[in-house]
Each structure stands twice: as structure tokens, then as C-alpha cells.
Amino acid sequence: MSPALGTLLLLIGLNLFNYIDRYILPGEVSLIQREFHSTDQQMGALTTAMFVVYMFTAPLTGWLGDRFRRKPLIIAGAVLWSLATLGTMWVHDYWTLYIRHALVGVGEATFGIFAPAVLADFYPERDRNRILSIFYLAIPVGAALGYLAGGELGTLWGWRAPFFLCAIPGLAIAALYGWIGREPERGACDHVKPTMNRTTVWGLFSNAAFLTASFGLATLTFAMGGISAWMPTFLHRSAGLSVGKASLAMGAITVVDGIAGTLVGGWLAQRWLRTNYRALYLLSFWSVALTLPCGALLFFGPPAWSIPVLFVTEFFLFLNTGPLNAAIVNSVSAPVRATAISLNLFCIHAFGDTFSPQIIGAISDRSNLRIGLGATLIFLVISALILRMGARFAPPLEETG
């Protein structure tokens, strides 16, 4: 097995349990509320706490990643988030859970930055969409398993048990990565011309390709973060499903759509790149544009249609996973890639999913969850417009040295 493939597989494993740990909580919101008597806004605030810590830690970890070896930083982050997840077993009040959830953000602010940068140094620009599409398959699979663990195991054994069971594998994979994982030479596979706005930190703020991809993803993330945090609860309240069945439905749809949508989106973008170097942005635009009418029908249509419409909505949402992340990685060069990814993460969480679950929860407390989730449609419109504009600034992928 080549060092690139072995490292890719280990990073996929870590990413899988990263998302399992993150999505246990949304799968069992109703169970936690029964014990702590928390409001919807308070439950949304747990996700806000994690992402506030995440986004303010990210710039520091990005700076570290451009100056020091990334392998030990990845291991440290994985160990930290796994231990924080494990510690949930001993949480017995809302504010301790709040602090625990915030600490998870520190660990995730390392892995989410360094893993794409490491993979970019193993593969050239034209292959990164394909590789990142494979890498990000862990998102829907991990999210689905997290929903299932939270809803099903939480119902059977109590809401703390899933956190304990899902923390151990993350520690084991981190140890395995420390043993056999490899770190490539920085910039070894970069071929696009290294201009000032691609190779300096200050240049990032005038790099239109980077900025449009980042803000397009940020507004999209507002919608996706809100939907992922509240959809099991929405199915429970609006479609009349039990907590376990709502999480099971969300998990099953997420894993099927996530795999299918991510693979189809990556495949379409890879073929489109043969004739149009703007394909990564254009595919992402169409992904969001097609999601809009489906989302409107999901939130405001007949409850009996909720499951089939959710299936179609999530498929379109996942089409952009590989292409949009590849667009961000390709918009910069190796000397500032970790910093650029960290700024992108700050942006997508500051303007995206840090506050969307809490905002949706607050709207729900004052009206209903349908209207709360309906707010995400506004941000999908903004995302589509930004990504369409971003196609004008996509960097050509010719090998210019």
C-alpha cells in the first residue's frame, strides 16, 4: 500500500469518528431535554458553544500547521476530542454538558484543517476533487452513525452510553495513525502558478477564488448546520415519528444520500473539469440551486411527504461536498494552505452553523420549528448567488510550474 493511500484511509477513519461524535447529540436532543428540562434554544446553544471555540481556535492551529509538522497536531486533536466525548459519561447537568461540548471544538479545529492540507500535498490539483470526495464520504456516514447511536442506543441504554461507545475507536485510530501515517513534503504536487494572493496570508483577502468559495460555503453551512441539528426533532414533532425512528430515518437517509450525492457530485465535477476549469464552482452552484425548492417543500409541505422529500433534498445538498472543498484547497498554494483552511473554517462557522441551530431554536420557541427551519432557505439563495459569481475567479489548472 502506498504512503498516500495508507494515510488517506487513516484520515478517513478519523474523520468518520469525528462526525459520529459530533452527531450523537442531535440524535438524542429529546432524551437530554427530558433530564435537564432544557429549551430548544438551550439545546441549540450547545452546538453554538462548540463552534465558537472551534472558529476562534482555528486561526492559531492554521498558523501552527504552516510552520510545524502536521502529523503530531492531527493526533493531538483526535485524542482531545475523543477524550471530551468520553467524558460525557460523567455529565449530570446542562452547564457541564455545555463546557464539554465546547471542548470538542478545540480538537476538531486541528483535524479539520490539517487533513485536507496533508492530502493536497499527496495529490495534484486535478485529482484533489476526486480524493476529497472520497475523504468527505466520512461526513454523511459519520453523521448517520451518530444519529443512529444517539437515537437508538440512547433510547435503549440512556443518552450517555453512545458517547462512551463512540469515543474509544477515535483513540485507537489516532494511535494507528501515529504508528504508520505519513506526512508528505509541502507543495510537492502543486502546479498552478504561485502568485502573491495564493502564497501570502494578506493575499488571501484579495483572492477572489478563495473568498467566494469560503463565503458560498459559509452561507450554505448555515443552512446545513441548522438542518442537521434539528431535522430529527422536526421529524419527531411534525411527522409524528418516535425519537428512535426519527433518528433512524435521518441516519439512513443521510448515509445513503451522503454516499450517493458525494460520489455523484465528485464524478460529475471530475468529468466537467476536463472541459471547464470552473466546474468545481458551477457544480456547487447547481447543487445549492436544486436544493432550494426541495427544502421549501420539506419544511412547509404535507407531513406525509417529509421522508421522501428529505431524501431528495439531502441528495442535492451533498453533491457539492468534494467539489467545493477542492475549490478552496486549489485556490491557494502550499505555504499558506493550512492558514487558508483555518480562515475558511472560521468564516463558515462564524457566518454559518455556529449560530444557526440556536437561531432556529429561538425562532421555534417563539413560533414553530417549520418557520425556524424555513429561515435556512434565505441562506441557500445567498450561497447560490455567491458560488455562481465565484466561477468567474476559478484558477486555471494548467501545469504552469
Image (cartoon, rainbow, N blue to C red):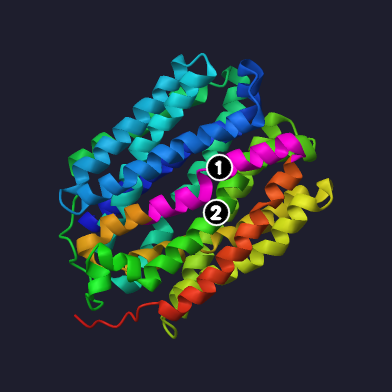
Q: How busy is the neighbourhood of tag 1: few (under 14 within 10 Å), some, or many (20 plus)?
A: many
The reply to whether the magenta stretch includes residue 351 is: yes
The residue under label 2 is which amino acid type? Gly
Q: Looking at the picture, how far across and down is residue 269, in whole percent?
A: 47, 73
- Horizontal side of residue 244 vs 254, given as left or right: right
User: Does residue 136 appear anywhere in the picture?
Assistant: no
Q: Callout 2: helix, strand or loop? A: helix
Where does the N terminus fall, quadrant-wise? bottom left
Point 19% across, 41% down: residue: 72
Q: Are marks 2 and 1 in contact (CB under 8 Å)?
A: yes
Q: Looking at the picture, how far across and down is residue 102, in whole percent?
A: 42, 31
Residue 288 lies in quadrant: bottom right
**Earlier residue among tags 2 and 1:** 1
Q: Which numbered tag is attached to residue 156?
A: none
Write down the region rendered in magenta: 344-368
Q: Looking at the picture, how far across and down is residue 248, in whole percent?
A: 64, 37
The residue under label 1 is which amino acid type? Ala
Point 34% across, 71% down: residue: 207
The reply to whether the magenta stretch includes residue 15 is: no
Point 42% across, 27% down: residue: 85
Mark 2 to mark 1: distance in Å? Answer: 9 Å
Q: Callout 1: helix, strand or loop? A: helix
* Residue furthest to the bottom: 275
- Horizontal side of residue 340 vs 158, given as left or right: left
Residue holding disc 1: 144
Whether 256 is drawn above or below 36: the answer is below
Q: Looking at the picture, how far across and down is residue 389, in whole percent?
A: 51, 76
Magenta: main secondary structure: helix
Where does the C terminus fall, quadrant-wise? bottom left
Whether 291 is drawn above or below 242: the answer is below
Residue holding disc 2: 258
Residue 71 lies in quadrant: top left
